[in-house]
Image: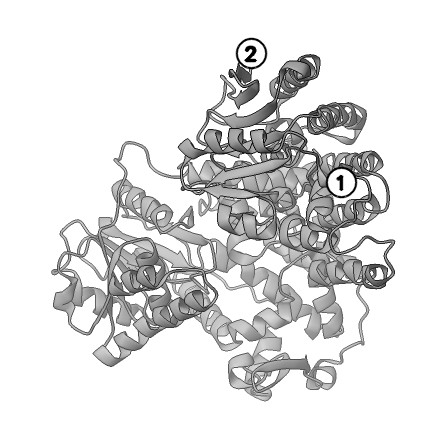
Amino acid sequence: MTDTIRWDQDADGIVVLTLDDPNQSANTMNSDFQESFAKVVERLVAAKDSITGVVITSAKKTFFAGGDLRDLIRARPEHAEVVTRKSEATKASMRRLETLGKPVVAAINGAALGGGLEIALTTHHRIAADVPGTVVGLPEVTLGLLPGAGGVVRTTRLLGIHSALHDVLLQGQRYEPLRAKEIGLVDEVVSSVDELLPKAKEWIKAHPDAVQPWDVQGYRMPGGSPSDPEFAALLGSLPANLRKQLKGAPMPAPRAILAAATEGAQVDFDTAITIETRYFVSVVTSQVAKNMTKAYFFDLQRINAGGSRPDGFEKYTARKVGVLGAGMMGAAIAYVSAMAGIDVVLKDVSLENAEKGKGYAVELEQKALARGATMQAASEALLSRITPTADPADFAGVDFVIEAVFESPELKNKVFGEIENIVEPDAVLGSNTSTLPITELAQGVRRQEDFIGIHFFSPVDKMPLVEIIRGAKTSDATLAKVFDFVLQIRKTPIVVNDSRGFFTSRVISTFLNEAVAAVGEGVEPASVERAGALAGYPAPPLQLWDELTLTLPRKVRQESRAALEAAGGQWVSHSSEAVIDRMLDEFDRRGRSTGGGFYEYVDGARTRIWPGLRTAFQSGSRQIPLEDLRDRMLFAEALETVKCFDEGVLNSVQDANIGSLFGIGFPAWTGGVIQYINQYEGGLAGFVARARELAERYGDHFLPPDSLVEKAEKGEIYE
């Protein structure tokens, strides 16, 4: 036995290696494991004459959780030699295991992700238990990383280059056992954990001469290798497709994965492993990997562990949700609640409207059935949990209310008034508003301590984020309930304090406005869109304007201005306002839903940028470097986020990062809007200097706030 791996040999000579790190709840590829693994393999080699086979399994709920991200996030370019040495040592042990000359089986009892699957891939046969929590995959790319323990080399040789790239490596998919077996990552599936060891030993006895397919004389890669003429002809499409997918965003991991896979396929196994190591080290020591790992693992982990949840309250589980308004948002909120097993009452002004709202869930379930993503019985059970109604009395017993009607304070107050006396006396009263101040809306109900903002993002069934907005009188108990509810429906909660536009709507508007301002300055619209793509935004800004419609942001702007001036404040106009006003008032260009905005549409399909922009705004009359256009968008959002911290709208760096990534499409490579500031070249001082450059060229709204300048002068970061 070593520190992290138990050794048990039975009377038949089969060694069971049980992965069990005593210092962690999950096994990871940390230094302790790497040392233990090397010792165990050395022992196997020394004792192989008395061994008939090897089974690798785990004593944890998961099989193996992957690399130790705490170690990886600290790796810097100056550590490249050390990282290379450690990676090569672990890979050498893996190679010795798979060429031991004895059959080796992975008995996968839980999640085998990243390094966990890479360990399993070194075995000759993989058996997975089809139990809750068992998933396999190589999700490293979603953290800005590359599988560094043979995952690229072995999946390409096992599945073929095309399948490995598209089904496993470039998207970081996670598969349940049956689907993993279809793809070829798993060889056998059993229905319980108890069946794993007997099945593994049975396979070992039946295959005493097991060997990896790539170690067999005459092996040919599935689907062909780059040396095959037919495959070679298609090889050029792989980088082209990746470029199309990335759209110029600075994402090194996908490019490195593609290079490691295609280059490695042209050489022998051991050379391919060396190539993979080289790319792994270049990626893991990059800043982008650190940004993405921090956000998508550490920040997300802290949020889901309750980082912004008030302490001292028992876990809450919603029993019956009442949704007010069966339009697009209300119908979708009802659907995701029912998906989580919650009974839902979906109310609208008429039963017909409410039934149409339920029809949204019916349509989504029909699509899920068609693609095999659900079973008929499960689908029927889900739909039975949604009760459409026009009768407020049906809200009896509701302990969680979500209002999702039109953005009108009067209408919202009216629908709450219809049900406040009917629902449970301590029911949450939540409003799905994207801009209206929660404290003001709360004045329309009696129990203001139970009133809170619950901002879903469209499409609700796909968007993972929910922005929780605390009003001035919202209680800690209510906030804790809503936080738990968001986790209950399998979404990610962030918590912000009340402000018009809150955090996400307020920040994304600066990105959109900066793009439109550039159009008004005479910049080619295509250049504006290109700059958005180069920055890494998932959708170019003018396309996004058309999707949102030009009328809604103007309405929000007008309401915000009126509220500010009514409170004695002074509105500071942005140059984008004149562009939007002309688009609406002079040209009647309202967006995609009305047939035309910044783009032209035929039968709802986007065709080209509207040619009228050229004459209306003298497109091309001003040349601005793409770097400046890109930074104007990124800096506008970052600086507005700093103001949100200054004003107390935000209290958590993690909420800011995840909210910007999951809610408003801030570029993934940055690690989120605050991480973008923290990691900027030269630190906060470098960011401040660049902001001042932009202010000098494009307006005072780029001047860094005093709080940011003060942090920069002290050499601090946001944490």
Question: Which of marks 2 and 1 precedes in the sequence?
Answer: 2
Q: Separation of disc 1 and disc 2 at Cα?
A: 31 Å
Amino acid bearing label 2? Met
Q: Is residue 473 above or below residue 23?
A: below
**In the rendered image, the vertical position of residue 391 relative to residue 123, given as above or below:** below
The answer to which quarter of the image holds residue 684 is top right
Side of 456 relative to 139 (left or right): left
Percent across and percent down for residue 89 are 75, 23
Asked whether, in this view, residue 400 is left or right of residue 3, the answer is left
Q: Nearer the viewer, residue 507 or 363?
A: 363
Q: Within 10 Å of the Cα at label 2, are there few (<14), some (14-19), or many (20+) other Cα atoms?
A: few
> Looking at the picture, how far across and down is residue 76, in whole percent?
74, 30
**Front in this rendered view, residue 406 or 179:** 179
Residue at which label 2 appears: 1
Residue hosting label 1: 214
Q: Is residue 663 visible?
A: yes
Q: Residue at x 52, y 72 (%)?
A: 548
Label 1, secondary structure: give it: helix
As drawn, is 631 to the left or to the right of 471? right
